[in-house]
Structures are given as C-alpha cells and as structure tokens.
Image (cartoon, grey):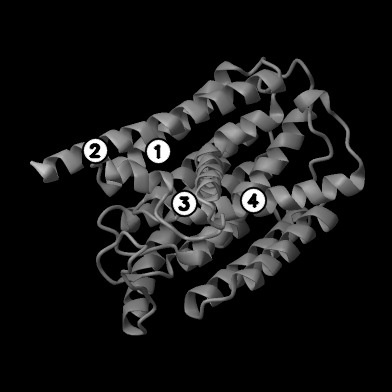
Amino acid sequence: MLIPLASAVTSFVVCFLIIPVIIKYSLEKNLVDIPGRRKIHKKVTPSMGGIAIFIGFIVASLIWIDIEHWKDIRLILIALFMVFFIGVRDDLVPLKPVMKLMGQLVAATILVLLFDLRLNSLYGLLGIYEIPSVLSYFITVFTIIVITNSFNLIDGLDGLAGTVAGISLLAFGIWFALVGDVVFAVLAFCMVGALVAFLIFNWEPSRVFMGDTGALVVGMMLSIMAVYFINTNYNLPANHTWRFSASASTAVCVIIIPLVDTMRIFILRISRRQSPFTPDKSHIHHSIMRLGLTHSKTTMLLGFIQVMYIALAILLIHVNENYVMLSVIILSVVLSITLDRLMIVRLNKEEDNVRV
C-alpha cells in the first residue's frame, strides 16, 4: 500500500505546482471558459486544468511503476494520450461531436483489441455468462464510450467532476491494492493524487476548470478501471476475501453518479420529445442547485451519495449479480423521483411567493 500512496503524493505535488502556471498562461492567452446561458459559472475561468492532471498522472506513473510492467500498460497510456490530445484540441478550437466520438472509438478499440480489455461475459446478469467474442468487443467498446462521456457530462459544477472521479478511483485503487494488483492500484492512486491537487483550485469559487482535456482523460481512466475491475474480480478464487459476487453491479455502484445522471437526462429529454443529445440544464446537479444548495454543498451531497452506493456494494459483497443490480436500479429510481418531486415542490412555492 505504501507505493500507491507514494504515487498519489507524487502526482499531487506535480499537479499542484503546475496548475498556477497553467492558470497564468491561460489568462494571458485567453484560454478561458466564458459564462453563458447554459453555464453556471459567472466569471471568465481558465479551462486547461486537465493538462496539469494528466502531467501529474504521467510523471507519477513513470516514477512508481516498475519498468518491467511498462509493456503491460503502454497501450493504456497510448489510449489516454489519444483522448488527451483530443481534449486539448477541443479546448483550444472546439471539435465537432462526431470527431470527438471517432477519436474515442479509436482509443477504445486499441484497449479492446490490443490490450484485450474485454467484458467477455455478463457475469450471471439475467442468467447469462459467456458471450461470443465479437459481441464482447462491441459491448466493451460501447461501455468505455458510455462511461467516458457520462463523466464528461457531469463536469458542470465547481468541484463535482473531481470529487466524483476521486471517490471512484480511490475505491478502485484500494481494492486493487487489497487483491495484490499493484500496477493498477498505482495507476488509480496517481490519478487520485492529481485530482485532489486540482480540487484545491477547482473548489467553489473555482479558479480553473479541467476542460475536455481532463474530463476525457479521467473519464477514459474510469472506464478502464471499471472494465478491468469486473474481469479481475470475477476471476478471483470464489473464497477470496475481497471477491464481490456481483462484479458488474459493484462496478456500477462505484461509478453510479455519472451513469444515473446520463440515464436520467436521456429519459427526460426523450419524454419531452427532444433529442437525448440536446444540451440543457436537466442534469442532477442543476436540479439539486434549484433546491437552494450552493456549488460546494451540491458537490458534497453527490459525493456522499456515491460513497453510500459503494458502501451498499460492500454490504452486498456476497449477494448475486441480479439482486444487487435490482437493488441499485430501485434505489436510483427512488432517489431520482424524490429529487424531481422536491424540485416541483420548490418551484410551486416560488410561484406562490411571486403571486403573493
């Protein structure tokens, strides 16, 4: 556990030292996010913080992962570099969504075909286990793209993306350390350390955003960790202390906030007969803020919910896939409906006050 912790400290220090330089340079070169109708922030803010996160992650990884293991993870780094450059390009000169998606598809395909990062089973979900190889390729690429973009979608509030990703990656990192996978534990902790440093500057009132540069890299990292966790956990001995009976459902619990948010906004937009890809302010964090919470309180509430789902997964460690997934779905639906009801009550009160 000492090496993962040391890697987190290293990435923290590197990222913490680089961010002020990026803020200064971004302001000088006008590399900023300008407030607008669909944005919550009120002032011009540098938007290249993801560069510091990525540099901190790479430097710490180079230092703390033994050179003999670099051949094992070089394809992961290549995929991360690809989405990093896509993010930088998009932050500098916005790319068309289809171009960003194509870049992500190439990165995901590298991971699936060359690194062999695959979901080759449904792990007992709906009674299905092994699936055909070709189908597993498509399912895994789809999963990576969904998780990456789900995380990108929640990056709309001071501190939120960094907090949610930090909690998820910390959970994955601790688990990999407990089962003896030091390489993936170090990768997770390297990203956690960089995110903690970033949050110091991104907490309300934010002095820098991670931008697409950071959101795509961190989102891709979450997808890699989730898929790798599912397979690694499933292949552990049945009597292993830290083997979860529900591999896929446990991974869903660890990254629940971006997944539920994406599903929720897609359902809401389709129910309004809008394109599910139409930007609006129907995200979970927007709804919570309408209840009167600040950026920081909204972030802490969603972080707390994420921790509760992880705790639920631990409590259900010996429960099978179908029951855990059913529990997660029911709980998520209840929380989402409760949030919508609270928002309606709040809006009705505001309308009554206006009439008075």
Query: Which residue is identified by label 1?
Result: 302
Q: How crowded is mark 4: few (under 14 residues within 10 Å), some or many (20 or more)?
A: some
Q: Which of marks 3 and 4 is nearer the N terminus?
A: 4
Residue 135 in percent (x, y) is at 86, 46
The part of the image, by quadrant, that contains residue 127 is top right
The CA distance from mark 2 to mark 1 is: 24 Å
> Is 241 on the left or on the right of 259, as rendered?
right
Q: How crowded is mark 3: few (under 14 residues within 10 Å), some or many (20 or more)?
A: many
Q: Furthest residue to the left?
A: 356
Q: Name the residue rendered at 61%, 49% in the picture.
A: 147
| Residue 274 seen in render | yes
Residue closest to the eye, 240 or 6 = 240
The CA distance from mark 3 to mark 2 is: 27 Å
Query: On screen, 73 above or below 354?
Result: below
Confirm or deny contact between disc 3 and disc 4 (CB under 8 A): no
Q: Residues within 10 Å of mark 1 (few under 14, many from 20)?
A: some
- Quadrant assignment for the C terminus: top left
Confirm or deny contact between disc 2 and disc 1 (CB under 8 A): no
Residue closest to the eye, 348 or 61 = 348
The part of the image, by quadrant, that contains residue 41 is bottom left
Q: Earlier in the sequence, mark 1 or mark 3?
A: 3
Query: On screen, 273 above or below 353?
Result: below
> Is 316 on the left or on the right of 307, as rendered?
right
The CA distance from mark 1 to mark 4 is: 20 Å
Query: Which residue is identified by label 4?
Result: 146
Element under disc 3: loop
Q: Nearer the viewer, mark 3 or mark 2?
A: 2
Residue type marked 4 = Val
Confirm or deny contact between disc 1 and disc 3 (CB under 8 A): no
The CA distance from mark 2 to mark 4 is: 35 Å
Residue type marked 1 = Leu
Query: Which residue is identified by label 2?
Result: 348
